[in-house]
Image (cartoon, rainbow, N blue to C red):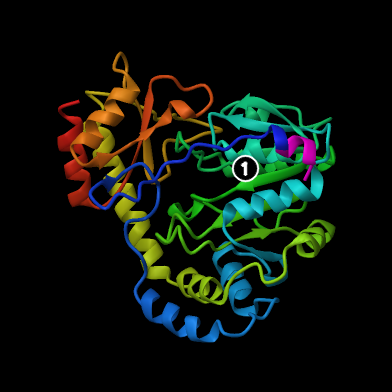
Amino acid sequence: MDPDSVRAAGRVHHGGSDDPDLLDFSANTNPETPEGVESVYADALDAARSYPDDDYPEFRAAAAEFADCAPASVVPTPGGLAALRLAFAARVTPGDSVLVPTPSFGEYAREVRLQGGTPEFVAHDDLLDADPASHAAAVVCTPNNPTGDAYDHDALREFAARCREADTLLVADEAFLGFTDRPSLSGTDGVVVARSLTKLFGLPGLRAGFAVATGRLRDDLATARRAWSLGTPAATVGAHCLRQETFVADTRERVRRERARLADALDDRFGVYAPEGPPLSSSSAPFLLLDVGERDPEQVVGSTRGRGVAVRDATTFRGLDSHVRVAVRTPEENDRLLAVLADV
């Protein structure tokens, strides 16, 4: 990390509310968690009196099964954002440029700047057409946050090949890919995949995730990773969650069904972002991006909050000035959101 760049860096706005009186649609985390999490955590807490096995064999095995890669390719991290930082730290040096999608997750640009690099912003739907040559790295987010669209997998693999030929690291943020049945880029040479357990399993405070890489790149990440990067409860609960295939399948179906219902219900009152055709497809994520039109987004956020519902002010994303983002939750909770938005 570059000391001079740290002094110039700021923080990034995120969604999420810890107000127990608010129904939170501002964060994109699953409102449900897998069965057995509490008992697994309790047992792991007893074991936390000793240092964890720094090789994390059970967690790495579960992550490998989940991401369809070799266990040796898995590098445990305390959340997906830690995997992103590890990837940038291993490749980006002061003066380097990195292709960054927009609008997208604001932490990409921040992490690049912390390493002394310069983010080169590209519209997320044009990024796969960009030339990766002369850039230290490129970032893709699939499904993209906050738009929700996912890249065509074949187009993504072709871009990964072009990055590899140019000796440009491709960082693939797949934080929301678990909500889909789309294949991962895990195990692709020249690519670091960042995965998070936060979103799919509804445990943002657990701080568990992992990176996936191969060859020398994987060795670099494994060497740079902090020792004991996951606490025993995070590693144990994480391994448990990653093996809950029925929970994942049920979550995907609920999100697919409820996302479509919300989009249909909100389409008359707001502009619902829904791209079509290659290299992008319509929203595959557990959220929707809404254009509030002539309404003031800040007033929309304040109005819904006054009625007990938190939505995300999406104008904090680069390039958006009339948008809010809403999560897809349970049917009953989504009904409440619709009732509140009907009066905005």
- The reply, left or right, for residue 265 in relation to residue 17 is left
Foreground residue among 59 and 233: 233
Task: Locate the C terminus and report the quarter of the image it occupies.
Answer: top left
Image: 86 above or below 152:
below
Is 215 placed above or below 303 here?
Answer: below
Looking at this view, is 136 or 279 the one in front?
136
Q: Residue at x 78, y 60 (%)?
A: 224
Where is 248 relative to 36, above or below?
above
Q: How many numbered callouts?
A: 1
Tell me: residue 79, above or below residue 17: below
Position in image of residue 75 (x %, y %): 69, 64
Residue 326 x, y percent position in the rendering = 33, 38
Relative to 315, 31 lies left or right: left
218 left or right of 252 in image? right
Q: Quadrant of residue 94?
A: top right
Query: Is any part of residue 184 visible from this angle?
Result: no
| Residue under numbered circle 1 | 154
Q: Residue 252: x percent and y percent?
A: 37, 55
Q: Residue at x 34, y 74 (%)?
A: 35
Q: Where is residue 34 drawn, in percent x and y?
A: 37, 69
Camera-side residue: 257 or 93? 93
Q: Residue at 44%, 54% (x, y): give it.
A: 199
Magenta span: helix, strand or loop, mainly?
helix
**Which quadrant would the N terminus be assigned to in this image?**
top right
Asked where in the image residue 295 lies, by quadrant, the reply is top left
- The answer to whether residue 233 is visible is yes
Identify residue type, mark 1.
Asp
308 in the magenta segment? no
| Residue under the point 82% across and 33% down | 96
- Find the magenta span and give its range: 1-6
- Circle 1 sits in a helix, a strand or a loop, which is it? helix
